[in-house]
Image (tube, rainbow, N blue to C red):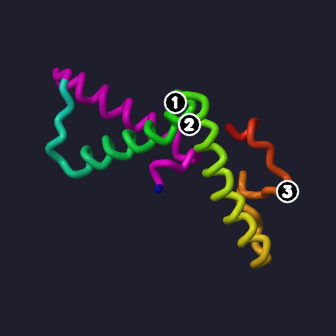
Amino acid sequence: VLATDMSKHMNLLADLKTMVEMNHAAGSDVLNVDTYSVRIQIMQNLVHAADLSNPTKPLPIYQKWVARISEEFFCQGDLERESGLEISPMCDRLNSCIPSSQ
């Protein structure tokens, strides 16, 4: 789940870039995935890329996914509102604009 958090987008990219540059500086064009931390970092970036790939899908699939994920966010916002909590970004069905959140 954390790999899909857009607030971590720039850090994920920077860490991946650093890993690739360090690997290249060591004289290799192939990533060494022998360590647990490198495998986790690669998997986090793959999950993140998959999460961001929705707009590349055919429009009907994209639209269904947007509707489903928006409803999931709105349900979370509804529960936050009912509990008297601050409503998380993009979770307020009363004040959200789906196209601008994409």
Label disc, if present, on residue 61 of the rendered structure = 2
Inspect the magenta stretch and tell me whether residue 21 lies in it: yes
Residue on which the image places disc 3:
94
Residue 18, image x, y percentages: 36, 32
Q: Secondary structure at mark 3?
A: loop
Residue 33, image x, y percentages: 18, 40
Whichever of labels 2 and 3 marks the residue nearer the N terminus, that label is 2
Query: What's the amino acid at mark 3?
Result: Leu
Residue on which the image places disc 1:
57
Q: Choose between 99 and 68: the one closer to the eye.
A: 68
Residue 22, image x, y percentages: 27, 29
The region drawn magenta spans 2-29
Give the CA distance from mark 2 to mark 1. Answer: 6 Å
Q: Residues within 10 Å of mark 2 (few under 14, many from 20)?
A: few
Query: What's the amino acid at mark 2?
Result: Ile
Q: Choose between 46 and 57: the one closer to the eye.
A: 57
Residue 67 is left or right of residue 3, and the answer is: right
Q: Main secondary structure of the magenta part?
A: helix
Q: Nearer the viewer, mark 3 or mark 1?
A: 1
Q: Secondary structure at mark 2?
A: helix
Query: What's the amino acid at mark 1?
Result: Lys
Label disc, if present, on residue 17 of the rendered structure = none
Give the CA distance from mark 2 to mark 3. Answer: 25 Å
Q: Secondary structure at mark 1?
A: loop
Residue found at x 38% / y 30%: 17
Residue found at x 75% / y 42%: 98
* Residue 83 placement: quadrant: bottom right
Q: Compared with residue 79, is residue 77 higher up or lower down, i.e. above or below? A: above
